[in-house]
Amino acid sequence: TECSLLLLQVKLKQGLKSAMAISSDGNAYLQESQFWRLYKEDPAACAVVMKTSVGVVYLLACLLEPFMPSFSREVLRQLNMSPDEDLSFCDDKGETAKAKRPWDFVSAGHKIGKPVPLFKELKDEEVEAFRIKFAGSQAERISKAQADAEAKKVAEKLKATKLSEGSSKKKQSGGSKSKTAEDVSVAKLDIRVGLIRKAEKHPDADSLYVEEIDVGEEAPRTVVSGLVKFIPLEEMQNRKVCVLCNLKPVAMRGIKSHAMVLAASNEDHSKVELVEPPESAAVGEKVTFAGFSGEPEASLNAKSKTWEKLSADLHSNGELVACYKDVPFTTLAGVCKVKTIANGDIR
């Protein structure tokens, strides 16, 4: 029941708090005894300190097993000892007699195993990987796993369709290859989750909006978009969008645009909808594509026509998921979508 679960959580927290207090007291005891001095001046007293300290370590290994099982197993292995199940039996006061006498845990003449570091140093890239992997709440991580599964399912479905279409086209063309964006990786595009902080009409152009968009930098970027005919101004306020951030800045009727808001359009371009990341996606997060890795270009090379080649394969699929070929636009919170335009071009 819910009450039982809450009680269990309280007990676990209390147990962890007690273990941490024992750890702190044990460390203080070891330092204050000045064992390095006793080793030379009073070997018998030093032996008592060492035996007690090893007992405290053993006690902690047993107490922390529910919280850090792999840590406990390694400590017990190095101590060459087995866990003491009697520690779970308490007296009338809720205390264990053994826990009060840590010097008795280790018998005289006991030999411990070869000590090795219990923890390894994490490199910066490992820390970042763990930060991304375990960011947010458990519910958000579950949502991310479900989103990844959804993205994989969509990608596999579209891939099968593309392979079928490609096989048919190959037969029709005698097996010749056409030069498309295959020699250019979509990872070169710096697409991020952006938040429109403010949007207003361009003072000198009836068809343009001027937006201030937060893309995770110190200051918002000014972006000019030709969306006035398709999206009401009130719907442009305080909403998350997908933003291409590494296009070369360009002046549009006197105002320089420093990025591009991505949107899908239908076949005759009479309808346009913004590509929307999940509501819980982090502002500034880079949109990724499964199977494509690498750093985006600082500024897309106009001569190589990188954007032109890659944008030819950006589209919304039949399930309204934004894709590059058959690979969904993906964030840690899930895939990016459009509202109603299926199989539309994304620009």
Image: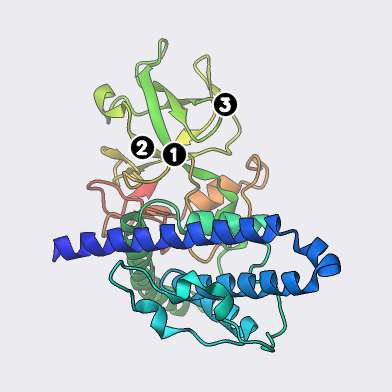
Residue 241 placed where, x, y %?
A: 38, 38
Q: Quadrant of residue 280?
A: top left
Kind of element beneath mark 3: strand
Above or below, comparing residue 100 to residue 76 in the picture:
above
Above or below, comparing residue 214 to residue 3 in the picture:
above
Q: Quadrant of residue 4?
A: bottom left
Between discs 1 and 3, the one toward the N terminus: 3
Mark 1 — residue? 283
Above or below, comparing residue 339 to residue 58 in the picture:
above
Above or below, comparing residue 211 to residue 118 in the picture:
above
Structural distance between the alpha carbons of marks 2 and 3? 23 Å
Disc number at residue 250? 3
Structural distance between the alpha carbons of marks 1 and 2? 8 Å
Which residue is at 30% across, 38% downward? 272
Res. 180 in view: no
Kind of element beneath mark 2: strand
Of residues 66 and 181, the one drawn nearer to the viewer in this rendering: 66
Name which residue type carries label 2: Lys
Q: Nearer the viewer, mark 1 or mark 3?
A: 1
Mark 2 — residue? 240
Check the image and name the residue furthest to the right: 40
Residue 96 placed where, x, y %?
A: 39, 73
Q: Would residue 32 be found to the left or right of residue 103 on screen?
A: right
Name which residue type carries label 1: Val
Check the image and name the residue furthest to the top: 203
Q: Are marks 2 and 3 in contact (CB under 8 Å)?
A: no
Q: Residues within 10 Å of mark 2 (few under 14, many from 20)?
A: many
